[in-house]
Amino acid sequence: MRLLVPAIAVLVAQAAEPPKVGTYDLELTTDEGTLVGELAVARAADTLAVRATVRGHSPATRSFVREAAGYVFTVAMGETTVRYRLAFAGDSLRGSFRMSTGGSGTVAGKLRQ
């Protein structure tokens, strides 16, 4: 006698992998082209301190918050706010960004060696 057992798919939400301390070289892609920059991650007491530099500008960090699938990183320069959604995996990161002025795009980065 043969028993038929239905296959059961179980989805497990993966916790966000934390970023590694160091500097990530970034490529931000928009409809208008590619921008280069960096994301510096440092340990500050029990938290992580982050700073982004893109096209020579280092806007003020407003927040860096862990979510279930990654991190939300918000910066501001003058009236403009940029919100990044980032996922870290090993020595790399991937994600997207949206500007308060309407621009958006993707982000990819690799930890400097």
Image (cartoon, helix red, strand yellow):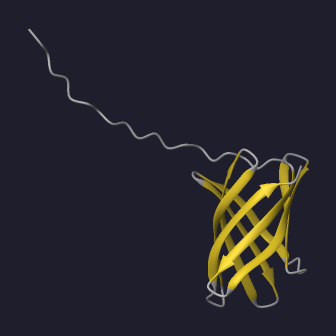
Q: Is residue 78 left or right of residue 104?
A: right
In this figure, what is the number of numbered marks?
A: 0
What residue is at 12 percent from the left and 13 percent from the top?
A: 2
Name the one closer to the observer, 87 or 79.
Answer: 87
Residue 96 in percent (x, y) is at 63, 69
Residue 4 in percent (x, y) is at 15, 21
What residue is at 65 percent from the left and 81 percent from the top?
A: 30
Quadrant assignment for the N terminus: top left
Spot the residue most to the top: 1
Spot the residue most to the front: 33
Residue 110 quadrant: bottom right
What residue is at 33 percent from the left and 36 percent from the top?
A: 9
Residue 86 quadrant: bottom right
Residue 17 in percent (x, y) is at 67, 45
Name the one closer to the observer, 33 or 15.
Answer: 33
Name the one closer to the observer, 112 or 51.
Answer: 112
What residue is at 46 percent from the left and 39 percent from the top?
A: 12
Q: Is residue 42 above or below residue 54?
A: above
Q: Is residue 15 left or right of residue 27?
A: left
Name the one closer to the observer, 8 or 15.
Answer: 8
Residue 92 in percent (x, y) is at 73, 52
